Amino acid sequence: MYQISPETDADYHEVEALYDLCFAPGRTALSSYRLRDGVPPIADLCLTLRDGHQILLAAIRYWPARIGERKVLLLGPIAVHPTAQGEGLGAILMRDSLIRATERGWSRVLLVGDAPYYARFGFSRLSDVEMPPPTNPDRVLGLELRPGAWVDIRGTVTRENSGKDKAALAE
Ligand SMILES: CC(C)(COP(=O)(O)OP(=O)(O)OC[C@H]1O[C@@H](n2cnc3c(N)ncnc32)[C@H](O)[C@@H]1OP(=O)(O)O)[C@@H](O)C(=O)NCCC(=O)NCCS
């Protein structure tokens, strides 16, 4: 029996500890974290998955980003506790959060990760999209939540501007 819930302030340190456990030391030095610096995550897409004893088994977070004036949903980090990996929990969190993102009107999702894993959810390489260096271009992957949402979108992914022109961003 699993429970999926939006991450709360009370979950924050536990989720950070799960990420520290699941990723190599220095994870926050990755270039994708530069897109998250000073930008609030998208609260209703950041999810925790707990078992019947309320043990945290998996978590996923999302941030807003942009390419030029186009809005992009940055997926990650996602992690599953090492004792529960390979049981489908990552897939449950991926699918649940992507449904929520679609329902909330997001059009396109971006992530940096292993194509052999994320291809099963429909992600494919974005050859015209660049992440801040250093990022292996083969790991820059995208998914359309709305048909055609990645067509003709090219350029460098930049940090969401929480300032005045945010409302003017195009979908
Ligand atoms: C990657 C991760 C989130 C997947 O979650 P999970 O619950 O273990 O995965 P699932 O049970 O949904 O799927 C298991 C399948 O994914 C495959 N898989 C898992 N990680 C993979 C990877 N990095 N590359 C390719 N395939 C991978 C498994 O081999 C398995 O394949 P199978 O279905 O053919 O047997 C989890 O393993 C994890 O937290 N890893 C450490 C942190 C991490 O790497 N996060 C992702 C950053 S890109």
Image (cartoon, helix red, strand yellow):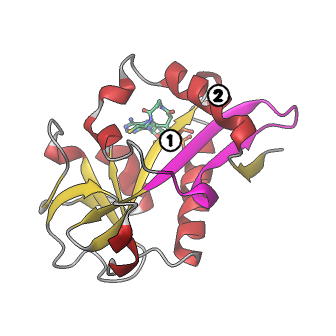
Q: Which residue is mark 1?
A: 78
Figure quadrant of residue 154: bottom left
Residue 61: where, in percent of width, then height?
A: 53, 47
Q: Which residue is mark 2?
A: 13
Residues drawn in magenta: 40-63
118 left or right of 62 in image? left
Task: Give the Cα separation between the discs numbered 1 and 2.
Answer: 15 Å
* Residue located farthest toward the top when viewing the structure as drawn: 25
Nearer the viewer's eye, disc 1 or disc 2? 2
- Asked whether residue 62 is drawn in magenta, I would say yes
Amino acid of disc 1: Ile
- Out of 52 and 109, give the one closest to the viewer: 109
Within 8 Å: ligand 1 and the Cβ of disc 2? Answer: no
Residue at 39% x, 51% y is: 118
Q: Is residue 88 visible?
A: no
The residue tagged with tag 2: helix, strand or loop? helix
**Residue at point 74%, 36% (across, down):** 10
The amino acid type found where label 2 is placed reads: His
Return the residue nearer the eye: 94 or 163.
163
